[in-house]
Image (tube, rainbow, N blue to C red):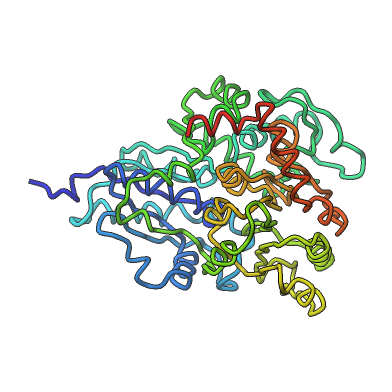
Amino acid sequence: MASVETSKPHAVCIPYPSQGHVSPMMPLAKLLHSRGFFITFVNTEFNHRRLIRSKGADFVKGLPDFRFETIPDGLSSSDRDATQDVRALCDSTRKNCLAPFLELLAKLNSSSHVPSVTCIVSDGVMSFAIKAAPVFGIPEVQFWTASACSFMGYLQFSELLKRGIIPFQSNDGTLDKPIDWVPGMSNIQLRDLPSFIRANNPNDIMFDFMGSEAQNCLKAPAIIFNTFDEFEHEVLKAIAAKFPGIYTIGPLQLLARHMPDGPSKSINSSLWKEDTSCIEWLNKREPSSVVYVNYGSVTVMSEKHLKEFAWGLANSKHPFLWIVRPDIVMGDSAILHEEFLEEIKDRGLITSWCNQCEVLSHPSVGVFLTHCGWNSTLEAISGGVPLICWPFFADQQTNCRYACTHWGIGMEVEHDVKRENIEFLSIIGYINEIWLEKIVNGSVLTKLFDKC
């Protein structure tokens, strides 16, 4: 008779190799594990080494039925603790990852110590896994880690070519043009589609990659979205009309909170070492008093913008927790001057990384200054925290538009940010007054919290 371990269903989970994609794949894998699945979680060799530095060598040993494996990403070595170049990484994963992934699946299936692989859960931009599944006669599902709105936006890239919008001309006012031809998306302008539309060359790597990967998802038997129907109902309905095999399972952050206690519950996917003192610092603050600032794992900015954010926060006179990655300034290290540090020493905490889910669920956090990445958006919603939105790229423009005009949970600041913008918007009482009005008047959040 087979052992318990070798008789389990075996899911291989493979995220795109950046923090914003690893983060949602991990709770999905843990939830599957809590329901009896054997899990193989596949990182790139580069990110595996980052996990070791962040969590220690024992962490990546995993559990008897929750294991970590690696494949190469095809890139040459780079700064060991910085986010890899997005364009190069996207191009390399689609060209170089299929062969080593097939080798890994074959190795797993030939092992007597693990169950045979029964399914693949692949990131929506790692569509080479769709080609791998039939080689082993197993099903594969795509996990789209961004919003459903952004997915629909990426599906329009071929339409943008047909309409002559690409090649894009940035100075002709096109971005402000209202568009009414995207199924399930109303009251939007061209600027609200994912930023990779702003390509002046139809062969641009990111334009081609994201448009192709979204279309490739439609070749899978099913697509999983980290969202919920009340939140993105119209666009989900439009996607389902084109591709019925969609499943909404979000917000995963809330599901993970209710996961049964077990060995896998404590497994964490952070590629950076987290500063646990953040929570101790928040414990000493008044309820809803803290401005939390985090631009995610990829966003970069100019030194000028860093300075404007810094003095805007300082001049707001509110306590703030600011996550400043070492690589956040374009081509340089982030340096905050002594004058600023002296000004905020009694009310500001600056660190390089934290457990964001814990921070956003802390009662002292009153508002979140964010890049509007989808993970950050959902984590803020799950914590009941309003947004100040400063989108950078990719789906963030789409998420920002919906947060500010459709869902009523955020306010946008202009891209060329000035300290006065941040000083004003960080007046937490003002933000919370608007936030409360939105909830009282029937924001989608009331539906979410009713379900929880």
Q: Position of residue 449 (x, y in %)?
A: 53, 34
- Judging depth in this view, the residue of 143 and 445 nearest the camera is 445
Position of 286 compared to 163: left or right? Answer: left
Q: Is residue 219 above or below residue 114?
A: above
Question: 354 or 299, which is in the foreground?
Answer: 354
In this orientation, which residue lies closer to the viewer: 385 or 211?
Answer: 385
- Residue at figure coordinates x 50%, y 53% from the top left: 23
Rendered residue at 68%/63% (across/down) = 322
The answer to which image quadrant residue 173 occupies is top right
* Residue 125, image x, y percentages: 54, 45
| Residue 71 higher or lower than 236, as above or below | below
**Residue positioned most to the bottom:** 338
Q: Quadrant of residue 289?
A: bottom right
At 35% from the left and 43% from the top, the residue drawn is 32
Question: In the displayed structure, would residue 195 be above or below residue 267?
Answer: above
Which of 380 and 233 lies nearest the eye of the viewer?
A: 380
Q: Is residue 17 left or right of residue 156?
A: left
The residue positioned 87% from the left and 42% from the top of the image is 169
Q: Whole-percent x and y of residue 140? A: 40, 38
Looking at the image, the residue that sits furthest to the right is 172
- Residue farthest to the left? 1
Tally of marks: 0
Q: Position of residue 275 (x, y in %)?
A: 54, 69
